[in-house]
Amino acid sequence: MSGTRDIVITQTILDAKNINAWFGSVHAIRDISLPVEKNTVTAMIGPSGCGKSTFLRCLNRLHEEVAGARVEGQVLLSGEDIYGPGTDPVAIRRKIGMVFQKPNPFPSMSIFNNVAVGLRLAGMGNKALLAETVEKSLKQAALWNEVKDKLKAPGTSLSGGQQQRLCVARALAVNPPVLLMDEPTSALDPISTAKIEELLIELKKEVTVVIVTHNMQQAARISDRTAFFLLGELIEYDDTSRLFTNPRDKRTEDYITGRFG
Amino acid sequence: MVGLLIGCAILALFPLFSVFLYVCQQGLPGLHVNFFTSLPKPVGEVGGGMANAVLGSLILITLASLIGIPVGIATGVYLSEYGKTKLSMILRFCTELLAGVPSIIIGIFAYSLFVIPMGRFSSYAGGAALAVIMIPTVARTTEELLKLVPVHIREAGLALGISRWKVTLIIVLRGSLSGIMTGVMLGLARVTGETAPLLFTALGSQYWPRSLDQPIASLPVQIYTYAISPFEEWHQQAWTGALVLVLFVFILNLTTRMILKRHAPAKD
Ligand SMILES: Nc1ncnc2c1ncn2[C@@H]1O[C@H](COP(=O)(O)OP(=O)(O)OP(=O)(O)O)[C@@H](O)[C@H]1O
Ligand SMILES: [Mg+2]
């Protein structure tokens, strides 16, 4: 892969090195290396089935939770290998949050508890502080005004777009330095999508975001870097503006101009 | 055709209603406050009730729940969360087998396990026998309900940095609790009417329950004893006992359904 050659990365927060991933005997990710710069939004694009979700799930050790799945390689989070011997995946996932494609609030849990549960389990007992953090997270996710009067209502009673923002709030509540998002807006209407996009641009002051998207306009609008995946390989990784205007690889060009995918 | 179906449906309901009506008709005359407050009277004396048997049944059910619910739920959780191991295959097979074992056999089992070593019939033995009967129902319901919780909900928990067993306990199990309650209530309803296993274990008694390591009265056994007796007054008592038992099971079922309606699991 020639793509990363001349990107200037000043401070790498997440550094994937030679990641290979399998589902049983299916080799889904082939030797991908991808450094992610702190306080940026990095987009991952590529045709369906090319391994974007799988790669993303290697970054927070979620891939290994699938029966028969396996990962090889290194992912350095601020210099420390999350796959290093003796590393606890639970502790890792607390530092690398994730938002899924489909909104998945915890059933039969209130809006408040959905956001609070991560904090509670991480040991935050102080009720005032808990309420404060929940409010802050819901505000960050641009949901506070819509739910502040019904925090006790079930999370599943919200609309799809609201549920997705609730999931964003839930992920943000535990204050992870990195946030992974797998097509977070694919099920949402344009207004909810716009809200999440604004949120991401706002968020990157504090959080580093890696986002999978099928929507190239979205990648162009919100991301600083873009990675193009094809058949389990990383084809090109560059500044977003450059990747979209002046791709180096023919396959990238074909994909972004809509010739396949 | 529709007429035929309706006819069959009525035929199926007929036994239920006729049993209920008959039990009501026979049992209602004996249904006084006395029934719930006083001990049985000796033959020939009028009045008296089955208070000790009502209380005894409640005690036995409580004991059975204390053992059966945790064990049943734990088994169900294990089967659903770690369902692909060899141990769980065996466990699932055994649970299914257990569900089919006639309750009298379970009574004999509890007899040899508790009554013989302890040297006497006791509430413990009765509660244990009923617990064993309850476990398959509770385990099965728990397993089925936990399996309904989609993978992406579990992954949401894992991705939040919650350990697997806490995800199971706090998110998956808690989210299915109202459904699991149904299994528990149905198990309880089933166990409340069990007679055979109690004959070998709790035996029966004409007195108030005194201690858990003594024989204890229970409604089904009392009904049985009174029904096969040659005395007219005892037959009346047995009918009233039957009515109370039927009403108890009805109410248990109805409450379950109401709870279930109120907390219907969220659809995605
Ligand atoms: N649970 C699984 N078991 C076996 N193979 C899987 C599994 N999940 C994904 N795969 C395979 O791994 C490859 C990568 O899948 P992945 O979900 O990462 O693609 P993707 O780029 O996210 O696609 P999409 O854009 O449709 O979400 C695909 O070929 C897919 O068939
Ligand atoms: Mg995907």
Image (tube, coloured by chain):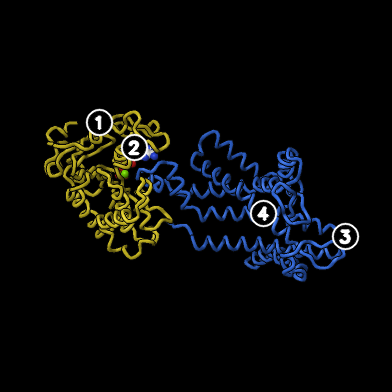
Mark 3, residue position = B230
Mark 2, residue position = A61
Badge 3 residue CB within 8 Å of ligand 1: no
Q: What element carries label 3?
A: loop
Mark 4, residue position = B59
Foreground pick, A74 / B188: B188
How much space separates mark 4 and mark 2, taking CA atoms? Answer: 49 Å
Q: Please name which of the two marks, 1 or 3, marks the residue nearer to the observer.
A: 3
Point 24% across, 38% down: residue = A229
Image coordinates of residue A193 in percent, x first then y, are: 25, 56
Is A172 rendered above or below residue A68? below
Quadrant assignment for the C terminus of chain A: top left
Q: Residue B49 carries which label?
A: none
The quadrant in which residue A55 appears is: top left
How much space separates mark 1 and mark 3, taking CA atoms? Answer: 87 Å
Which chain, by letter, is yellow? A
| Amino acid identity at mark 1 | Lys
* Residues flagged by tags 3 and 2 on a common chain: no
Q: How crowded is mark 3: few (under 14 residues within 10 Å), some or many (20 or more)?
A: few
Q: Is mark 4 on a helix, strand or loop?
A: helix
From the viewer's perspective, tell me whether residue B93 is left or right of residue A117.
right
Point 79% across, 56% down: residue = B206
Badge 1 residue CB within 8 Å of ligand 1: no
Mark 1, residue position = A17
Point 60% across, 56% down: residue = B185
The quadrant in which residue A52 appears is: top left
